[in-house]
Amino acid sequence: MTKVLLSLHVLAAILAVGPIAVAASLFPRYARQAAAVSGGRPAAVAAVLHRVCRVYTVVGIAVPVLGFATAAQMGVLADAWVIASVVLTGAAAVLLGAAVLPAQGRMLAADGAEARSAARLAMLTGVFNLLWAVVVVLMIVRPGSTTGA
């Protein structure tokens, strides 16, 4: 059962977090272009990227759910690498839900008036992606683990 849960957890992470990371990273570029040309194709692309981020955020809830189930099955819920991963995942989720998605929405609604905030949004998105990169490293390296990685 552990292998099934772990496989589902990894698949969920790739299929849910990956699209968010890519779409959120591309959004500031297209939002800036939309502001420069006042709508058109860049605005439509930015709107689609925002929708991808919103939809996959809901799908992404499966990642920590399956992660907790996997860690419980493996008996490692109290391990430092799991706790650190949970904290970083929570930080990434809060950053996405409280900063990235609302900023994207404001930029779409402002129709170009929020173009200067694109740089800040790009930075926040970079931090979001960095948090996930650290979580991936923790999941692979598992510092202090006795599970035989």
Image (cartoon, grey):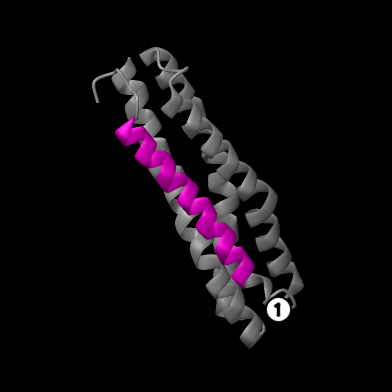
Whether residue 24 is situated above or below residue 34 in the rendered picture: above
Please say whether residue 120 is one of the residues in the magenta stretch: yes
Viewer-proximal residue among 9 and 119: 119
Left or right of 97? Residue 142 is: left
Q: Can residue 13 be seen in this view?
A: yes
The quadrant where residue 70 appears: top left
Q: Which residue lies furthest to the left in this view?
A: 148
Whether residue 37 is situated above or below residue 126 in the rendered picture: below
The quadrant where residue 27 appears: bottom right
Report the amino acid beneath label 1.
Gly
The quadrant where residue 47 appears: bottom right
Question: What percent of the width, then of the height, locates residue 120?
Answer: 63, 67
What residue lies at 57% left-to-right and 48% top-to-bottom? Answer: 55
What residue lies at 42% left-to-right and 50% top-to-bottom? Answer: 18
Residues shaded magenta: 119-142
Question: What percent of the width, then of the height, locates residue 12?
Answer: 42, 37
Please say whether residue 69 is one of the residues in the magenta stretch: no
Question: What percent of the width, then of the height, locates residue 52?
Answer: 54, 55
Q: Which residue, given by chain and number where applicable, does mark 1 sit on?
A: 112
Please identify the dominant SS of the magenta region. Answer: helix
Q: Can residue 39 be seen in this view?
A: no
User: Total number of numbered labels?
Assistant: 1
What residue lies at 56% left-to-right and 66% top-to-bottom? Answer: 122
Q: How crowded is mark 1: few (under 14 residues within 10 Å), some or many (20 or more)?
A: many
Quarter of the picture holding the C terminus: top left
What residue lies at 38% left-to-right and 43% top-to-bottom? Answer: 14
Q: Which residue lies furthest to the front in this view?
A: 144
Question: What percent of the width, then of the height, locates residue 50?
Answer: 59, 59
Viewer-proximal residue among 99 and 50: 99
Left or right of 137? Residue 119 is: right
Q: Is mark 1 on a helix, strand or loop?
A: loop
Viewer-proximal residue among 145 and 139: 145
